[in-house]
Amino acid sequence: MDHSTMKGRIIRMRDLIEKVGYAESTIYALVKDGKFPAPFKLTPGGRANGWFEHTIDEYLQEREHEKMLSEQQIAKL
């Protein structure tokens, strides 16, 4: 099954760590706190988790937007 045609590329933890620059433990802590997109099971009842790459790209864009807003507010002080 080609997942890339459904909703984009699925990335696994190894690739996610490289993409976002967080440690695995940090990612799971952020997921637990609701501050990072949660993974989904690649197969029902299976152990393998993944994330749609577009979901992670959106997360990173939101972080960049928040950073820019924060910098603008600091500049106004």
Image (tube, rainbow, N blue to C red):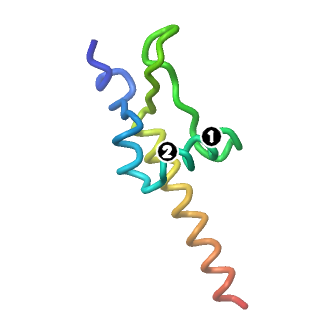
Q: Is residue 3 left or right of residue 69?
A: left
Label 2 crowd bin: few (<14), some (14–19), many (20+), radius 10 Å: few
Residue 76: x and y in percent read 69, 88
Q: Is residue 70 left or right of residue 47?
A: right
Q: Residue at x 55, y 55 (%)?
A: 62
Mark 1 against mark 2, which lies toward the viewer? 2
Residue at the far front in the pictured view: 25
Residue receiving disc 1:
31
Q: Is residue 29 left or right of residue 20?
A: right
Q: Residue at x 57, y 69 (%)?
A: 67
Label 1 crowd bin: few (<14), some (14–19), many (20+), radius 10 Å: some
In the image, residue 50 sits, relative to residue 55, either above or below, namely above
Q: Secondary structure at mark 1?
A: helix
Q: Residue at x 34, y 42 (%)?
A: 15
Residue receiving disc 2:
24
Q: Is residue 54 left or right of residue 77?
A: left
Residue 2: x and y in percent read 26, 17
Specify the amino acid type for callout 1.
Answer: Val
Q: Secondary structure at mark 2?
A: helix
Which dot marks residue 53?
Answer: none
Residue 72: x and y in percent read 62, 80
In the image, residue 33 sits, relative to residue 3, either above or below, namely below
Residue 71: x and y in percent read 60, 79
Of pointers 1 and 2, the one earlier in the residue sequence: 2
Please tell me which residue lies in front, 59 or 22. 22
Do the residues under discs 1 and 2 have CB atoms within 8 angstroms? no
Q: Residue at x 36, y 40 (%)?
A: 14
Q: Measure the C-alpha gap from mark 1 to mark 2.
A: 11 Å
Quadrant where the C terminus sits is bottom right
Numbered-mark total: 2
Specify the amino acid type for callout 2.
Answer: Glu
